[in-house]
Image (tube, grey):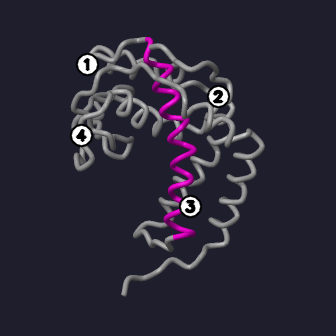
Amino acid sequence: MAERNTHDPEITRWSVEAATIYHRHSGNAVATRLAGLRLDVPLAQPVLRDIWWGHVMFQMQSQTEQLFSGMIDFDAAAVDTPVTDMARLVGSWHLMSGDPEMLLCDRWPEAFLAYEEGAGLPKPSRGAVQIYHDTAIVCGLARWFEWLLQEGRVFPDMPAVKSRIKGLLRALPAALQRLGKISGERLLP
């Protein structure tokens, strides 16, 4: 029989904190409004879908310059919009940077320029990338709490899991605030 996670009081406390933040920012109303939003994003093409900072390798060229040297974990690759890759990669850097208030495209302009040139992501899709990232923060927290508190799952590196949850929780208020400001039925690229 597989080992079952006993409810860690710290994770339980974080889930209560997340629910409080969610309700304070009218999360249900935001989710309802977003459900009707149509994002005009680039056409579907092969993408990685699980590209985050831990899956991208860089090699130091000098004390200030790094060059891309490889990637790992292609299991989630599928056909989707390149917005998913950009939101996942730059969003993972953003969560590690500790400044959840700043917009992704303002914090990582070089990454956006490189991806726009390499993957054909049109410049105006930056808003869609931010929405994907902010939505992933909300859904990511919900998923972790479901796995840990409802399903009792055990993960081999719980300190890494807790670190990820803390980063998402830290980013939650800013993400909900940005999502709450979206109006209308359509976000054009």
Residue at 26%, 21% (x, y): give it. Answer: 119
- Label 1 with label 4: CB-CB less than 8 Å: no
Looking at marks 2 and 4 on the same chain, the residue that comes earlier in the sequence is marked by 4
Task: Give the numbered dot on residue 78.
Answer: 4
Q: CA distance from mark 1 to mark 4?
A: 18 Å
> Which SS does the magenta portion mostly show?
helix
Using the numbered discs, state the Cα–Cα distance from disc 2 to disc 4 in whole angstroms: 28 Å
Residue at coordinates 53% horizontally, 24% vertically from top-left?
A: 107
- Residue at the far bottom in the pictured view: 1
Quarter occupied by residue 64: top left
- Helix, strand or loop at disc 3? helix
Q: Which residue is mark 1?
A: 118
41 w.r.t. 158: above or below: above
Which mark sits nearer the N-terminus, 4 or 3? 4
Q: Measured from the top left, where is residue 139 in percent x and y? A: 53, 47
The numbered mark at residue 178 is: 2
Q: Which residues are magenta?
A: 124-150
Q: Nearer the viewer, mark 1 or mark 3?
A: 3
Describe the element under mark 2 as helix, strand or loop: helix
Three-letter amino acid code of the residue under disc 4: Ala
Q: Which residue is mark 3?
A: 145
In what element is the residue under mark 4? strand
Q: Position of residue 120 (x, y in %)?
A: 28, 16
Q: Nearer the viewer, residue 132 or 157?
A: 132
- Mark 3 and mark 2: Cα distance apart in space: 23 Å
